């Protein structure tokens, strides 16, 4: 049973291929097109998945799309009718696109696939899943649990914005939902817009900004914007939002509530913006914790699986792990819409194809390293075509050499094996530095990533050493859990540092691993083991042997507003366009001063 899953036409288009329940390949279109959050038909991602599996479209049993466009169209029409005549500008802009393209999505998919020249696609081969069922399937089926509660939280899919499900040996059932326009994801996106960041992209920035602020606006948010019930269900006061009918997320009433217009992109971030971010984050965590308790009560399960865009809020995930009612949680690493392509493929395999689910130790995501890899010959050809100078080292020499360079303060582009699926670089398309360096965060933000200085960086740490550095004693292989740095590693602030607030806190050294210690002494942790990523594991081991520290900085191999690199040529261009010191592609080492 071969199933090709597709998500497209909204944001983060992707494709995934599953054979007899085993994930063969998955990738986002943006990595090939180099258009960040590419929403078009994922032609190159589909072609890659077929090539990786060694099959044609004729050999694929089912092609599954991640949601039901007709239900989404129904929501749009009902929403416009409910608010009419308000929203006419948005209606005039949106409806012609739906009538011309999205209502004919089966034909659009079939034509897009057949243009690849990989075989015919009869219309009856194309299936459509429910958006939140696709998310739920992406969370439960690859998880390490025989049974689990499932919680999906995002902006909106068809009508659903929050869904509680239950996965067992008998299958996956969705038990309850909160419906549009009441959405935790859209509340977060509304503040993302108001704080001057791009919706569906800047939510990470809001989460990173929050620790610089104080939760001064929590009561204002709760009193005016969201009514939260004990079971986590909630309603938004739509008088303050414009997303139902307008072309923006918030309106004049929202601006009046918080004392001024939305921040424009590029405007100075003030303490007020930081306080708003912190307040939003506090409210979000409260809702997530209450929803999780309700899911526990409804299912009686000890395990919880998470998906949907809100599941990428790793601060909330950390609180869930520490304070929630569940013993274990597992989060789909591609929790957003890209991962729903994988979810719908798995759902068809198990629920239509009769494939028996086998629970794998750890999980079935294979480290989420599901994208393309490149051979020694392909990398050598890129080096030759670029006229670059490189040394090819043995494994033993490679890991020792790179570890020594990092220990000497060098910033390294690390390009190995299969590309990651999902928004995080997990050690195969990464930029790596020394977590002990007090200046590394500024160097990476300003000289390599070219992004806002307040953005934090994540540690990669040997799985067996994680509890030596952080208040965590378990797996976090996908960088989706935030936990505190251990008290014993923290540094007491100097007298002149104690009164600092806002961005002024940025350069205070807070621990013996300052490059990965955020201003609230937290860190977004990725644990590394020999099974999921043996080469990254060996690099950490070598660094520990030289320095005594089994922890490094890991950030994605890209610059601001570009997708993570995919090919050796992408890696070369990023390396040469930034102030990285070294590029390592498999066993080839390129030093900047030699180019």
Image: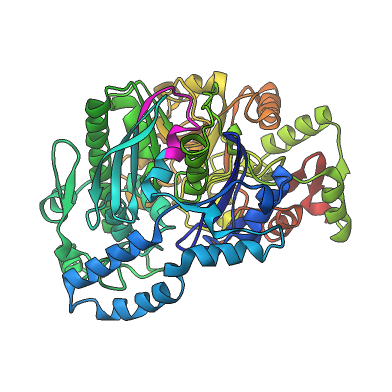
In this view of the protein, which residue sits in the foreground, 234 or 88? 88
Q: Is residue 312 magenta?
A: no
Residue 395 in picture, x, y percent from top left: 81, 30
Residue shown at the point (87%, 54%) measured from the top left = 381
Q: Quadrant of residue 75?
A: bottom left
Q: For the magenta stretch, what is the residue range?
A: 137-149
Q: Quadrant of the image for the N terminus?
A: top right
- 122 relative position to 591: left or right: left
Does the stretch in magenta take in 147? yes
Q: State the residue at coordinates (14%, 65%).
A: 239
* Residue 280, percent from left and from top: 26, 49
Q: Of 500 and 150, which appears nearest the observer?
A: 150
Quadrant assignment for the C terminus: bottom right
Measured as percent of width and height from the top left, residue 481 is found at 43, 34
Q: Is residue 481 left or right of residue 240?
A: right
Left or right, 302 with reference to 546: left
| Quarter of the figure with residue 46 | bottom right
The answer, for residue 34, to whether it is visible in the render is no
Would residue 382 be visible to someone looking at this image? yes
Task: Report the side of 536 relative to 510 (left or right).
Answer: right
Residue 541 percent coordinates (x, y): 67, 24
Q: At 32% from the left edge and 81% from the top edge, which residue is drawn?
A: 92
Q: How is the image coloured?
A: rainbow
> Looking at this rendering, what residue extends furthest in the left direction?
223
């Amino acid at each position: 049973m071969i199933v090709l899953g597709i998500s497209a036409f909204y944001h983060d288009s992707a494709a995934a291929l599953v054979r007899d329940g085993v994930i063969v390949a998955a990738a986002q279109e943006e990595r090939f097109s180099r258009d960040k959050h590419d929403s078009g038909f994922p032609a190159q991602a589909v072609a890659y998945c077929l090539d990786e599996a060694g099959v044609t479209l004729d050999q694929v049993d089912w092609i599954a799309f991640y949601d039901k466009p007709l239900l989404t169209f129904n929501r749009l029409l009902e929403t416009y009718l409910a608010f009419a005549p308000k929203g006419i500008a948005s209606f005039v802009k949106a409806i012609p696109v739906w009538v011309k393209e999205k209502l004919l999505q089966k034909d659009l998919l079939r034509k897009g696939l057949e243009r690849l020249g990989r075989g015919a696609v009869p219309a009856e081969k194309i299936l459509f899943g429910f958006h939140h069922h696709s998310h739920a399937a992406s969370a439960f089926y690859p998880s390490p649990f025989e049974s689990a509660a499932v919680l999906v939280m995002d902006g909106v899919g068809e009508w659903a914005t929050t869904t509680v499900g239950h996965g067992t040996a008998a299958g996956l059932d969705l038990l309850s939902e909160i419906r549009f326009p009441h959405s935790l994801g859209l509340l977060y996106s509304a503040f993302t817009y108001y704080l001057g960041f791009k919706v569906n992209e800047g939510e990470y920035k809001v989460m990173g900004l929050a620790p610089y602020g104080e939760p001064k606006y929590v009561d204002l948010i709760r009193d005016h914007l969201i009514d939260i019930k004990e079971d986590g269900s909630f309603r938004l006061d739509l008088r303050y939002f414009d997303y139902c009918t307008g072309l923006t997320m918030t309106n004049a009433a929202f601006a009046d509530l918080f004392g001024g217009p939305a921040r424009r992109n590029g405007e100075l971030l003030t303490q007020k913006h930081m306080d708003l971010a912190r307040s939003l984050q506090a409210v979000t965590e409260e809702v997530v914790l209450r929803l999780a308790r309700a899911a526990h009560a409804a299912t009686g399960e000890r395990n919880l699986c998470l998906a949907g865009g809100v599941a990428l809020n790793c601060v909330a995930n950390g609180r869930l792990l520490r304070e929630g009612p569940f013993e274990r949680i597992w989060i789909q690493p591609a929790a957003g819409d890209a991962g729903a392509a994988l979810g719908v493929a798995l759902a068809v395999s198990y629920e239509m194809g009769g494939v028996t689910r086998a629970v794998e130790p750890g999980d079935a995501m294979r480290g989420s390293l599901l994208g393309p890899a490149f051979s020694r010959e392909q990398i050598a050809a890129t080096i030759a075509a670029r006229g670059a100078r490189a040394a090819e080292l043995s494994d033993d020499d490679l890991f020792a050499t790179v570890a020594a360079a990092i220990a000497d303060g060098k910033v390294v582009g690390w390009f190995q094996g299969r590309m990651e699926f999902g928004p995080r670089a997990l050690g195969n398309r990464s930029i790596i530095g020394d977590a002990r360096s007090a200046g590394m965060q500024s160097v990476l933000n300003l000289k390599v990533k070219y992004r806002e200085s307040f953005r934090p960086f994540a540690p990669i740490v040997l799985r067996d050493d994680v509890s030596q550095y952080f208040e965590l004693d378990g797996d976090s292989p996908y960088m989706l859990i935030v936990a505190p740095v251990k008290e014993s590693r923290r540094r007491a602030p100097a007298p002149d540092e104690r009164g600092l607030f806002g961005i002024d806190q940025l350069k205070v050294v807070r621990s013996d691993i300052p490059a990965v210690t955020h201003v609230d002494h937290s860190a977004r942790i990725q644990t590394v083991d020999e099974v999921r990523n043996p080469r990254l594991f060996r690099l950490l081991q070598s660094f520990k042997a030289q320095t005594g520290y089994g922890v490094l900085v890991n950030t994605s191999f890209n610059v601001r507003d570009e997708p993570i690199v995919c090919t050796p040529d992408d890696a070369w261009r990023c390396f040469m366009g930034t102030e990285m010191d070294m590029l390592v592609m498999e066993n080839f080492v390129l030093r900047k001063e030699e180019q």
